[in-house]
């Protein structure tokens, strides 16, 4: 049986993980079994550059932290080798990076995740990963809003051009 000091240390680690989970807008739980050191280093670098926290956590500790954070993640997710990627300010980064990595590496498997405290299935994480970046979505929305206005301006300018042409024709007719 572990001593009191070890239990306190583990308890503080679980509380820290739970705190991080509560602060995060999105998270992805993966199975990393079979990853090479080189691939892991490359993956961690890419995640770090996108402000994604990535860590390998014992299943029992992660399970307790998830319960402490009031996330409803099924127990079968906490089997085998487990790593957690979370991000506080970017909904897409963990899903995109880990999904792309899993496409290149068959052994790397997305188990589940969460979005704003709600359970997200593997399929939902993959769909989230396929979304275009935030800037592209904003540009598309603004383009959709701007299109009718541009059309209206085009129609009105055509009407004004026709009026000016008609007035010029009248002026030329009267002066001739």
Image: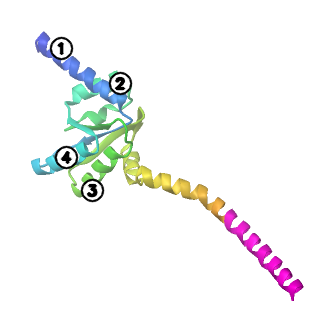
Disc 4 to disc 1, C-alpha distance: 31 Å
Assess whether residue 23 is covered by the magenta stretch: no
Q: Which residue is mark 3?
A: 103
- Alpha carbon separation for disc pair 1 and 3: 39 Å
| Sooner in the amino-acid sequence: mark 2 or mark 3 | 2
Given the current orientation, which residue lies at the most extreme right position?
174
Q: Residues within 10 Å of mark 1 (few under 14, many from 20)?
A: few
Question: Which of these two is toward me, 122 or 101?
Answer: 101
The earlier-in-sequence mark between 1 and 2 is 1
The image quadrant where one finds the C terminus is bottom right
* Up/down of 17 relative to 50, above or below: above
Judged from the image, the secondary structure of the residue bearing numbered disc 2 is loop
Find numbered disc 1 in the image and state the secondary structure of the residue it sits on: helix
Q: Is residue 153 magenta?
A: yes
Residue at the spot 33% in from the left edge and 50% down from the top edge: 96
137, 142: nearer the viewer: 142
Q: Residue 164's spot in the image, x, y percent?
A: 77, 75
Which residue is disc 1 drawn over? 8
Point 22% across, 17% down: residue: 11
- The CA distance from mark 2 to mark 3 is 30 Å
Residue 54, quarter of picture: top left
Of the image marks 4 and 2, the number of the one nearer the N terminus: 4
Is any atom of residue 153 visible in this view? yes
* Location of residue 137 in the rendering, given as x and y in whole percent from the top left corner: 47, 53
SS for callout 3: helix
Tell me what residue is drawn at x 37 percent, y 38 percent: 89
Is residue 100 depicted above or below 112 in this figure? below
Which residue is label 2 attached to?
69
């Amino acid at each position: 049986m572990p001593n009191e000091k070890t239990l306190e240390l583990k308890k503080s680690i679980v509380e820290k993980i739970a705190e991080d989970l509560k602060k995060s807008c999105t998270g992805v739980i993966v199975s990393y079994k079979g990853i090479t050191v080189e691939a892991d280093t490359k993956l961690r670098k890419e995640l770090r550059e996108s402000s994604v926290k990535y860590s390998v956590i014992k299943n029992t500790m992660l399970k307790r932290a998830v319960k402490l954070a009031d996330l409803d993640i099924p127990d079968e997710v906490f089997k085998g080798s487990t790593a957690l990627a979370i991000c506080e300010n970017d909904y897409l980064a963990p899903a995109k990076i880990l999904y792309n990595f899993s496409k290149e590496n068959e052994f790397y498997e997305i188990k589940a995740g969460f979005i704003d405290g709600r359970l997200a299935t593997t399929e939902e994480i993959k769909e989230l990963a396929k979304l275009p970046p935030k800037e592209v979505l904003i540009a598309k929305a603004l383009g959709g809003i701007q299109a009718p206005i541009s059309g209206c301006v085009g129609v009105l300018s055509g009407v004004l051009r026709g009026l000016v042409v008609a007035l010029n024709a009248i002026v030329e007719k009267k002066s001739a």
